Image (cartoon, helix red, strand yellow):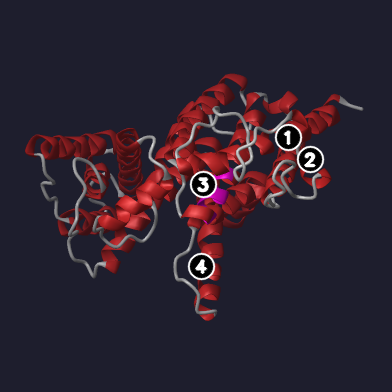
Amino acid sequence: MTPDVLLVIFAALLGLLVGSFSNVLIWRLPRGESIAFPPSHCPNCDHRLGVTDLVPVLSWLSLGGKCRYCRAPIKARYPVVELLTGLGYGVIAALFPPLVVGWGALGLMVLFTILLVGSAIDLDTYTIPDELTLPGTALGILFGFLNGRAGAEGLPDLAGAVQGALLGAGLVVAINQFGSWVLRRFRERSFPESPIGYQQISLALLAGAWLGPWWGLGAALLSAAVNGAARRAVRVPELLTLGGLLVSVVLGSAGYGPGMILMVQGALAAAGATSLVAGVYWWLKYRGRSADEGADEGADEPADASAMGFGDVKLAAVIGAFLGWERLLLTLVVAVFAGALFGVAQLAMKRENRVKFGPFLAVGALVAMIWGAQIIQGYRDGLGL
């Protein structure tokens, strides 16, 4: 066997083991439990699992899908997650040979795990834990640094990872901001967050368009500081910020200011940076709470209509950090198209009208990871670029 084939086999075996750990994350993260303690145990009888109970896939098959100690059924999702992770890691090692791209291959495996775990949790709880997305964004930027050091072709370097993370979060949160504004019929928010939240993100969009991403972030942080000093949400009208952004884009297209492309880039990057700062703030404030506790608290607190979940914003940042901005755009195109088709199907079947967007982002990211280079090159060739 060649070294590349051996690495593919090793990666698939590693994936089976990581898939077993992924099941721990899927079960424990939404419940606010430690992922290390107590050791693996049956969720029904709490009996500690032995080594023979933890062999990926084979243990589930040998036990007939039931706990060895209490005979409670074990979800088929456990071996499915393990098999998918093994398959995914093997495919990544084959398409991105570790001997060629170096650490980048491991980074894509980490991304695959984040996408799979985040999707499974989103399907269960309509949430994507911050413990997954915020450290995931940092890891994506770290692997960008390693890619740059290794000269990995086709993967973002440090600057590309930072740009991808900011634009990923910024683009999805901009869609949310305007979508939510439409859902509210262009009325102002009734329940603005304090000290930092969606109003500051809208301000960052406008300021970033004219002043650039870092000044846009600065304007948002200044607004947050004012809220903190006043101990309440000092309103920043979205008619001014979101409406002003639309006017700014029109002016930019007419040749005023930095120009439309730079204005859009600055606005999205500023909004993305503000979103990540807000995400870190709220994560630290509510860290340790389970998804159920958050849902119970959220049920008691009034909230404005929202077009998308904030977890989707942070997951887009993760994808952008690992794959770069070009593959991120392809991810969003695939995710929006697939999500729209699923939403129409739900309406036709008269089922719930809420769409869990995280799994569609994950599918789009996998398409971009595997076929992104060919699709992007084909698009450029079609435009004669």
Q: From the image, tell me which residue sits under label 2.
A: 59
Label 4 and label 3: CA atoms lie apart by: 18 Å
Q: Which mark is residue 54?
A: 1
Tell me which amino acid carries mark 1. Answer: Leu
Q: Nearer the viewer, residue 333 or 259?
A: 333
Lower sequence index among marks 1 and 2:
1
**Closer to the N terminus: mark 2 or mark 3?**
2
Of marks 2 and 4, the one in the foreground: 2
Span colored in magenta: 117-123
How far apart marks 2 and 3 lie (CA) works out to 38 Å
Residue that mark 3 sits on:
328
Residue 384 in view here: no
Q: Amino acid at mark 4?
A: Ala
Crowding around mark 3 (Cα neighbors within 10 Å: few <14, some 14 to 19, many 20+) is many
Residue 73 position in % (x across, y down):
69, 52
Between marks 1 and 3 in the image, the one whose residue lies nearer the viewer: 1
Q: Which tag is nearer the camera, tag 1 or tag 4?
A: 1
Chain-order first, disc 1 or disc 3: 1
Contact? badges 1 and 2 (CB < 8 Å): yes
Residue type for callout 2: Ser
**Mark nearer the N terminus (1 vs 4):** 1
Identify the residue under disc 4: 340
326 horizontally vs 192: left or right: right
Verify whether residue 189 appears in magenta.
no
* Contact between labelled residues 4 and 1, with CB atoms less than 8 Å apart: no
Residue 376 placement (x, y as % from top left):
60, 49
